[in-house]
Amino acid sequence: MNLPQIPVIDLGNRPLSDLAVLAPDKVRLLSASGRALTTGLVQAWMDRRSQAWLARNVTPYREEIAAVAAASGAAGVHALNISTEWACSSIAQAGCLMRTLDWPLHGMGPALTVTRHDSVAGAWWQATWPGFVGVLTGLAPGRFAASYNQPPIRKTTSLKPLDWVLERRRSARRTAIPPTHLLRQVFEKASGFEEARLLLSETPLAIPALFTLAGADGRSIVIERLEDRYRHRASPNASAIANHWPDLPGFTEGWPRGWLRGVDSARRFRDACVWASGLDVLPADFSWLQYPILNKFSRLAAMMDCISGTFILMGLEQAGNSAVPATQILRLEGLKSTG
């Protein structure tokens, strides 16, 4: 079976909306997949709500999202760009970051794209999809690597569906920046690990988030965020996260409880911690992709080293109760922040 290659697009200083102009078919593919998951009526309602929400929120990328919708003619572009239904596992240590990203949309694996960007802080690369203007997984050689994970739903009542609704109502009242837009700003502006850590920790957010950050100075950290609060878990302890707030000794006081998200988040966290505790260099292959870190919703697996400038990536798609490669493995090595 001849799997497709992951394209690498050098956007330089151009906006991410230009990627949709280059690959409008991939935007329409994701739109159709979202429509199949939610139905056309629900997608249209989500899109209207998302557009109204973005009109109120602090983000420099509002016009890019509108440009994506116009260029592709696809429905649901605004909803896609503020969707937080991503579940993920992230592992960081010694300048290395490994992660999977899980989402139930079909077609995401083959549509995976790598983009290169210039910024005042230096060049950076990310794994993305045409039509999406935030950042989920990125590498800034010589500075840091970082990823976004979906946070848990806060437990306010004893009913998860009701708490989901309450979480949405809470976010609807916020006007701060969405987390994936903040992560993009960090790649564009932060000169190194410490500046990135401060921005990801202290910038007010529209919704909670989980960030994993690995620096070229060897430090790594998980930043667990509420809208206006944060807490850190840093190396030499395992820097790993799935999609819940771990109940660690001395680490729960004053923090809300949450509903776990994704496939077996607790076990994914335990397995990720094992990998993080022994992570000095990137593994030679993707043998670490084992259940439940690899599950039927997995759509990408990535390994990054911000010291050596290595970015290894593979798209995944569902096959029965698991996921299988949907692209060839892309290996980018010796990436530099300049030139």
Image (cartoon, rainbow, N blue to C red):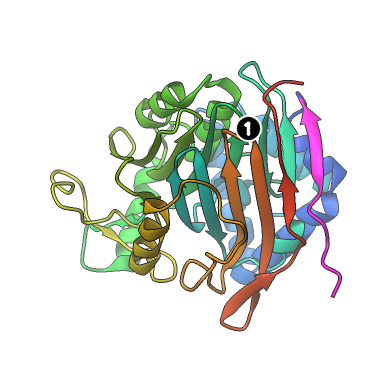
Residue at left 67%, top 53%? Answer: 313
Q: Which residue is mark 1?
A: 62
Q: Quadrant of residue 170?
A: top left
Q: Is residue 248 left or right of residue 136?
A: left
Q: Is residue 75 left or right of residue 279?
A: right
Residue 9: in magenta span: yes
- Local crowd size for mark 1, using a 10 Å CA cut-off: few (<14), some (14–19), many (≥20): some
Q: Nearer the viewer, residue 177 or 56?
A: 177
Residue 126: in magenta span: no
Q: Nearer the viewer, residue 51 or 203?
A: 203
Residue at left 73%, top 34%? Answer: 116
Residue 113 appears anywhere in the view = no
Q: Is residue 32 left or right of residue 244?
A: right
Residue 19 percent coordinates (x, y): 79, 40
The magenta stretch is 1-12
Q: Is residue 19 above or below residue 290?
A: above
Task: Tell me the element at label 1.
Answer: helix
Q: Is residue 182 left or right of residue 326?
A: left
Residue 157 percent coordinates (x, y): 21, 62
Residue at left 51%, top 43%? Answer: 96
Task: Say what amino acid the circle numbered 1 marks.
Answer: Arg
The C terminus lies in which quarter of the figure? Answer: top right
Q: Is residue 267 above or below residue 193?
A: below
